[in-house]
Image: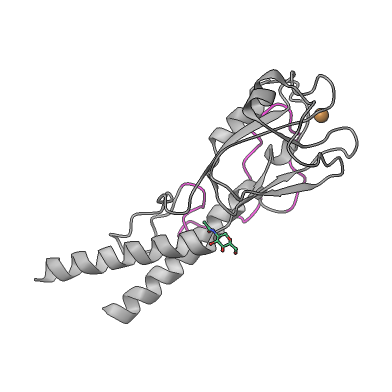
Amino acid sequence: MAACSMNRLVGFLFVAISLLHCTSAQTTHIVGDASGWAVPLADPTFYSSWASRQTFRVNDTLVFNFASARHDVATVTRTAYDACDASSPIGPVPTTSPVTVTLTTQGLQYYFCSVQGHCAAGQKLSINVVGATVSPPTRTPTLPPPTRTPTLSPPPSIAMPPSSSATPPTTSMAPPPAAGGPPSNSAPGVVVTGFSVTILSVALALLL
Ligand SMILES: *[C@@H]1O[C@H](CO)[C@@H](O)[C@H](O)[C@H]1NC(C)=O
Ligand SMILES: [Cu+2]
């Protein structure tokens, strides 16, 4: 009997946490992280590598940071993307940084810089936007203590200076981040994790 009610509780919590994730956690994706939106001199696959480390969901946003007027953001079809053909972009092609794009539809989306030669050199980004019903990579809810966390956030039980151990950039393009804030690509995960732990604690307190 105890096991049965525990299973139901766990199931309830899992559904509740999943719903909260889906309805409240829009992620802002800084394209290229600290490298921004530029011609990737060191690695033409830089933006596909970056995209492969992200999960893009409907209502998330992309932010392209770049040198205004030296680059732009063209939204294009797959055919144009594959050919780096800038003759018929979809909609406007903004040239002033930052450019924020809200991901409103599921499926594959294609962007590149329409400045001559930049797309061919790798300044192009394709992403797959998934819907809110796909389960996000949540921590498993079977263990109540808030010590199991995704790898993005440091365990709360380990004393650690808040910002001195910021991870170095993974590409040779990026200069080391200036002293100061945490890496921007880890913030959403940390926020979501803290939120989940809070909800989990409240739910357990109410139901046990
Ligand atoms: C996206 O945001 C709109 C407006 O807030 C909302 O109506 C819609 O349900 C959201 N879609 C998803 C998948 O979160
Ligand atoms: Cu460019």
What residue is drawn where x is 74% and y is 18%?
Answer: 120
Location of the N terminus by quadrant is: bottom left
Provide the major secondary structure of the magenta segment: loop
Picture coordinates of residue 200, whole percent (x, y) = 38, 69
- Residue 168 appears in the figure: yes
Residue 193 highlighted magenta (yes or no): no
Picture coordinates of residue 192, whole percent (x, y) = 51, 59
What residue is drawn where x is 77% and y is 45%?
Answer: 178
Against 100, is 201 above or below?
Answer: below
Picture coordinates of residue 36, whole percent (x, y) = 75, 38
Tell which of 200 and 80 is nearer to you: 80
Of all residues shown, which one is farthest toward the right?
Answer: 69
What residue is drawn where x is 32% and y is 60%?
Answer: 141
Give the extent of the magenta segment. 151-180
Of all residues shown, which one is farthest toward the left?
Answer: 1
Tally the marks: 0
**Ligand 1 - quadrant of the structure image:** bottom right
Left or right, 5 with reference to 113: left
Residue 177 highlighted magenta (yes or no): yes
- In terms of image quadrants, where is residue 84? top right
Tell which of 133 and 14 is nearer to you: 133
Picture coordinates of residue 25, whole percent (x, y) = 54, 59
Location of the C terminus by quadrant is: bottom left
Left or right, 193 with reference to 173: left
What residue is drawn where x is 54% and y is 53%?
Answer: 189
Of all residues shown, which one is farthest toward the bottom?
Answer: 206
- Residue 183 appears in the figure: no
| Colouring rule applied to residues | one colour
